[in-house]
Amino acid sequence: MEPWRLAELTYGQIKGEPPFQVAVLPLGATEPHNLHLPYGTDTFQVEVIASRACAIAHGRGARVVLLPALPYGTETNQMRFPLAMNLNPSTMGRVLADLIDSLEAHGVDRLLILNGHGGNDLKWVLRELHRSTKVHIFLCNWFRMISDCYSSIFQEKDDHAGEMETSMGLAHFPALVEMDRADEGAVKRSRFEAVNRGWVEITRPWHLLTTNSGSGDPRAATAAKGEELTKVVAERIGGFLGDLAASPIDETFPF
């Protein structure tokens, strides 16, 4: 039993205790990841990272609670692949608002949304809820916090089911990885150079962008790379959670 994991706690263990200082809500997805990784890849990854980060924060004295992961995300551009399970952005916003209302009702006033799915665009949720809740909401897209160490671990930058995510799979759920099925993860360029350069943004239709939903070559992946990345990310998030729990909430918080 991990004392920070709500799903494993009993009412008897938390009854009469002061409220947790910080809640962590992991967000995953159910979607294809090339031919070799499971549909639950995003959820499995973010659960490992969240648990390790909470363990670090707990070890430093923080009263942190890890909420069960939400295993669905926004998949509007992957719906041509079978059983990609979509929550529209507005639906995701409503789900998060309801869960945040629950935290407020139970006296938890700090929340880290730990997002593990690139299709979830959530900054607007923070802006919309900023004036309607007493819960202080923080957002971490864990895959965007590794730019300074990425090239020292991985050979090439990828996007989806490539070397990085495959390494995470080999490290944390190897029995579900079928490397002999993987394709090279090649992607097509847009006919518009402004899109290729990032000057103009689109919602990419994944069935046209990729061959089998993968973006990035997974063949250089190793479990050791996945474990190295996990350690870095968990330490960074765990440190933040410890700082967040220790910080008093006053009129200038979080500054």
Image: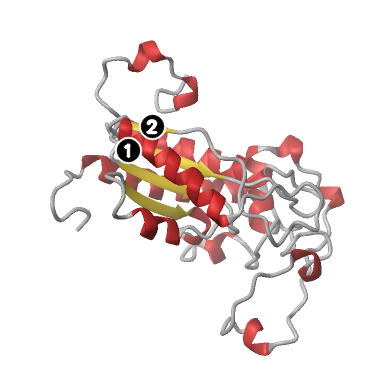
Q: Residue at x 46, y 33 (%)?
A: 67
Closer to the camera in the image, 236 or 102: 102
Q: Position of residue 133 (x, y in %)?
A: 30, 46
Q: Residue at x 44, y 61 (%)?
A: 124
Looking at the rendered structure, the secondary structure element under dot 1 is strand
- Locate residue 110 relative to residue 229 in the image: left or right: left
Q: Is residue 142 visible?
A: yes
Q: Residue at x 27, y 44 (%)?
A: 134
Q: Position of residue 53 (x, y in %)?
A: 42, 40
The residue type indicated by label 1 comes to: Val
- Locate residue 125 relative to residue 162 in the image: left or right: left
The residue type indicated by label 2 comes to: Val
Q: Position of residue 45 (x, y in %)?
A: 59, 44
State yes or no: discs 1 and 2 in contact (Cβ < 8 Å): yes
Closer to the camera in the image, 178 or 19: 19
Q: Quadrant of residue 118?
A: bottom right
Q: Which mark is residue 129?
A: none
Q: Position of residue 130 (x, y in %)?
A: 32, 55
Closer to the camera in the image, 29 or 46: 29
Q: Residue at x 27, y 19 (%)?
A: 17
- Locate residue 68 relative to residue 107 in the image: left or right: right
At label 2, counting other C-alpha atoms closer than 10 Å, the crowd grade (few under 14, some 14-19, many 20 or more) is many
Q: Is residue 103 above or below residue 82?
A: above
Q: Is residue 53 visible?
A: no
Dot 1 corresponds to which residue? 22
Dot 2 corresponds to which residue? 65
At label 1, counting other C-alpha atoms closer than 10 Å, the crowd grade (few under 14, some 14-19, many 20 or more) is many
Disc 1 from disc 2: Cα separation: 6 Å
Quadrant in the picture for the C terminus: bottom left
Question: Residue farthest to the bottom?
Answer: 193
Q: Quadrant of residue 63?
A: top left
